[in-house]
Image (cartoon, grey):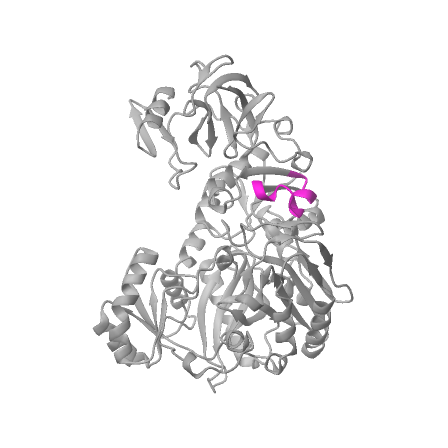
Amino acid sequence: MTTVLIANRGEIAVRVVHACRRLGYRSVVAVSEADRDSLAARIADRVVCIGPAEPARSYLRPELLAQAAVSVGADVVHPGYGFSSEKPELGELLAGEGIAFAGPRPETLRAVGDKSTARREAIAADVPVSPAADAHDAHTAVLAANEIGYPVLLKAVHGGGGRGIYLVNGESDMHRLFDQAAAEARAGFGDAALYVEKFYGQGRHVEVQIFGDGEGEILVVGDRDCSVQRRHQKVIEEAPAPHLSEATRTLLHQSAVKLGAHLRYTGAGTVEFLVDTESRTDPAMVVFLEVNGRIQVEHPVTEELFGVDLVAAQLLLAAGQPTGLPDKLDTPSGHVIECRLTAEDPHTDFRPSPGRITRLDLPHGPGIRVDTHVYENYLFPPYYDSLMAKIIVRAHDRDAAVARTRAAIEATVIEGVDTTKDVHRFVLDHPAFRRGGVTTEWLDEVWPPRRPDPDDENSTSPRHNSPSKPAAEALA
Amino acid sequence: VLDLVAKLDASGLEDAEIVVGDVSVRVSKSVLPNNAHESPRHAPARSVDPDPTPAVSATEATPAPAPDTSADPAGSAVTAPMLGVLYLRPSPDADPFVTPGDAVGPDTTVAIIEVMKMMNPVTAGTAGTLLEVCVQAGQLVEHGDVLMRIQADG
């Protein structure tokens, strides 16, 4: 019997246990001390406690996860998302023990794990990237910015998670900000290297789901729009991305295939792009952002639209079995929306709100799926990401999907902790979202709803340097 | 290895690798350094637990494990700080680190937990007399498992 070690927690661990059950695989979940009572632990065939609550001493340790896999006799390890999912070391340790990793090869993770190498791979695969240039000092940065055209972003080469990014509107800004940005890059990422990149102020986040066989064959499983973001954290996702021309969609899908084939990508992955809503060309201006070498939080919108099981396909591929995915998928009619309900208070700057869940009513009805790890009386722990539940709703078209999602959010009752339900209500009711195609800056402009403040427009400040974002950062 | 571990304990070093002839041993105070891929050429025999079921009880039925310093009638528990393969001797033909009746101090090494060929010493954590060893060498231990009990001094 195939044994799967699940090297993750929360709703994705539950999701993988369910996939194991479907496939007749034995599931073992690796938990921290804080997750012994988790839903995944309750429903898995076996549980092993790998370390204390702190992620740095449990879920972020490839060695502990690999040792757990060896000790329980696992054939496959599923890493979920975040935590150790994109650490090449985990796959390497497992390969040394003859255990399969349900994810891309370690060298693929290395190639796409860093902004500059990922960009190099994209260029090599003939995928459009934003105009950019290395900046060794303020002088070369100014030359590069003149070439590219202001405004530009000044970014740390080794930065990540939306940190270490400065918006620069002109030459005087560049002189003023360069040294500061370099010092911050050195302090934050251990390397002062910076580069200048064109800034698209009106971009949408559109990503393409791919599934590779590891030999260069890439299946496209449609696209998703994840532009509703709070400080670079996705809040609502939908599939397909609304209002894209056929030419733009084709460009996105073909670019993803080119990059996936170039990487000989293995398993489920996502290629993220920015679509410039100000471009008047067809196809629209599209630039590569990054590759996510893992299953993503928002994978259910794709699964529900296409009627596929991406997590099962990951496990089957790792186990050396046929994935059950077709060779080619036509885009079906219909539309799917996912809302991420988190344990945060959206009225007090999204302050985390862990605690005991005293009441839980989940929505039911046609086309409704809920992926969650919370249950009534569950003590939602303070150590991890605040994601509580994903409400996923499918309907025959986008208008119907928005309306039904709105009703499903209303029908969702979680008591004992604060939730972001009000944000979802607000977005789903908002005319701009209902029209479709908002930009990634949009939610931060409209939430929290407030009186206009003309003094609030200092756009040369390090606006992308949002307050620290803990574990959630890796979950995009 | 015991000697090395004791010396590491006494030193200010976080971890150390010692090579004597064709034997190299790496010891560490921190839970797990990141550079743990390098495998020592000699280490306590690695045993992949052939029958894991007796070693691990179903966690759902297990109450929260005793905290490291819980004092109960049977003495203070020494618990596993991480998951791994437990060893009670510094090498297969050496004497055990400790046996019941031995006096231990908080920093006395009482066992080693191997995680992917990385040896992590486990210390008593409390001063007293060793009452019993609750686990078998070579078995998988999970974080929080009770390894030993100590009758605390005073």
Quadrant in the picture for the N terminus of chain A: top right
Task: Determine whether A157 is above or below A73 in the image.
Answer: below
Horizontal arrangement in the rendering, residue A393 relative to residue B150 (left or right) = right
- Magenta-span inclusion, residue A445: no
Q: Quadrant of residue A32?
A: top right
Horizontal arrangement in the rendering, residue A441 relative to residue A168 (left or right) = right
Horizontal arrangement in the rendering, residue A165 relative to residue B48 (left or right) = left
Specify start and end residues of the magenta stretch as a single range.
A32-46
Q: Nearer the viewer, residue A228 or B109?
A: B109
Q: Nearer the viewer, residue A231 or A139?
A: A231
Task: Determine whether A381 is above or below A233 in the image.
Answer: above
- Magenta-span inclusion, residue A38: yes
Decide if residue A401 is in sight here. Answer: yes
Residue A455: x percent and y percent? 41, 81
Decide if residue B97 is in sight here. Answer: no
Q: Quadrant of residue A400?
A: bottom right
Residue A75: x percent and y percent? 58, 40
Residue A155: x percent and y percent? 34, 67
